Image: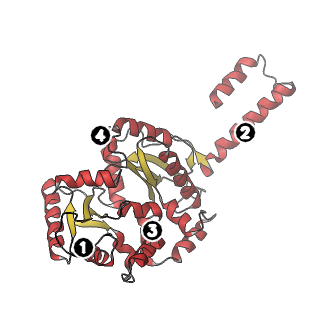
Amino acid sequence: MALQGKKGIAKGSKSSSPPQGPQGKWIIIAVLIIVVFAISGYAAIVLLSHGNIGVPASVLQERVASKFGGEETIFIAVCLDEETSAKNILRDIRAPAVIQSVIELHERLENETEIERVQSVATAFKDGVPGDLAEVGAVLSAFFTPSEVEGFVNGDFSITLIKVSPIAGLSEAKKKEVTEIIQADIDSITKPAGVKYIITGVDPQTSELIADQFPGSLRKLNIVVELEPRFARSEEIRDVRDPEVLKYVDLLSERAKLVDGVVDAHSAAEIIKEANEGRIPKTLRSVLSLLEEKDEAKRERIYDYISKDYSMTLVRLKIDDDAEAAEIVGEIKEVINIGRPAGTSVYIAGDLVQDA
């Protein structure tokens, strides 16, 4: 628009004298506004154009892996076994005995050297497991957001997931070894009667079960916001916990949810808002203070979305299994095609990008 405006001025000017009258006045004001934005743009909002255009998807994914570790996930579905002949079987996967079993497995898996990260409901029970089902539900609701609970426990409370991320860069043979390690750990823990543990990659029906009960869990895509300050001592952002970045990823998350085929979207902003009555604090200091007030387990949740050097943050998208990769990637490119905070870049990463 700026170039067109300048061209229009050039065409309309038949002499070197400045524009006259009301029209000339507005043209001068418009030019001044453009100049102001040109000078201060880096301290406010920049446009989408950035150096990541044309960079191979595999390279971008490696950058994400260098900050967050392996993004590949092995799922363990902990299920109520409807075909069991055991007596007095459990009717709710949130039963204290099941939670205790999940905690035991979670801790074993965290100690395995080939495993980068383990996610499950176990993290909510650092102070122990209540003896009552209702109290277990209350602990989960207090620790996780409703959408996070839905990511671990299905609607009829018959399945809970444990999500295991092997370290990045493993060969197929090594990944198979990790699956065998997981199975060995499952075999060694205490399991309540009428509960079974099944793993994706071992039982072919596990993936179908997860796709049906936890839509979007098997296909994921990340919107990546990364710090790229260009000027020393500028007002460009240097910590992705900055409120401007949090507001930005919150907006990206809401825009992504409107895309057909995106089941859900989550970002660090969701955790911050949950801890602050639905609002993002106005200053970085306030954000840091808010996080310091939380216990260690709750603070650790932020690192699912923010790198530990605070230079990168993710909006994690769950994608419907029937959605076309190329269509989804194209739509998400439109989602991120908005102004962004100064000193940041934005791109899309994940297996879905490479499949598109």
Looking at the rendered structure, the secondary structure element under dot 2 is: helix
Q: Callout 1, which amino acid?
A: Ile
Q: Are dots 4 and 2 in contact, CB under 8 Å?
A: no
Q: Nearer the viewer, mark 1 or mark 3?
A: 1
Residue 274 is situated, as x and y percent measured from the top left of the image, at 54, 66
Q: Dividing the image into 4 quarters, which one contains the C terminus?
A: top left
Q: How far apart are marks 4 and 2 (CA)?
A: 43 Å
Q: Dividing the image into 4 quarters, which one contains the N terminus?
A: top right
Above or below, comparing residue 68 to residue 132 in the picture: above
The colour scheme applied to this rendered structure is secondary structure
Which is nearer the N-term, disc 2 or disc 3?
2
Q: Residue 355 carries which label?
A: 4
Q: Mark 3 points at which residue?
A: 144
Crowd rating for badge 1 (residues with CA inside 10 Å; few <14, some 14–19, many 20+):
some
Q: Name the residue under label 2.
A: 33
Looking at the rendered structure, the secondary structure element under dot 3 is: loop
Above or below, comparing residue 185 to residue 202 in the picture: below
Question: In this image, 153 relative to 40: left or right?
Answer: left
Q: How far apart are marks 4 and 1 (CA)?
A: 43 Å
Q: Callout 2, which amino acid?
A: Ile
Residue 37 is situated, as x and y percent measured from the top left of the image, at 67, 42
Which is nearer the N-term, disc 1 or disc 3?
1
Which is nearer the N-term, disc 2 or disc 1?
2
Question: In this image, 214 relative to 305: left or right?
Answer: left
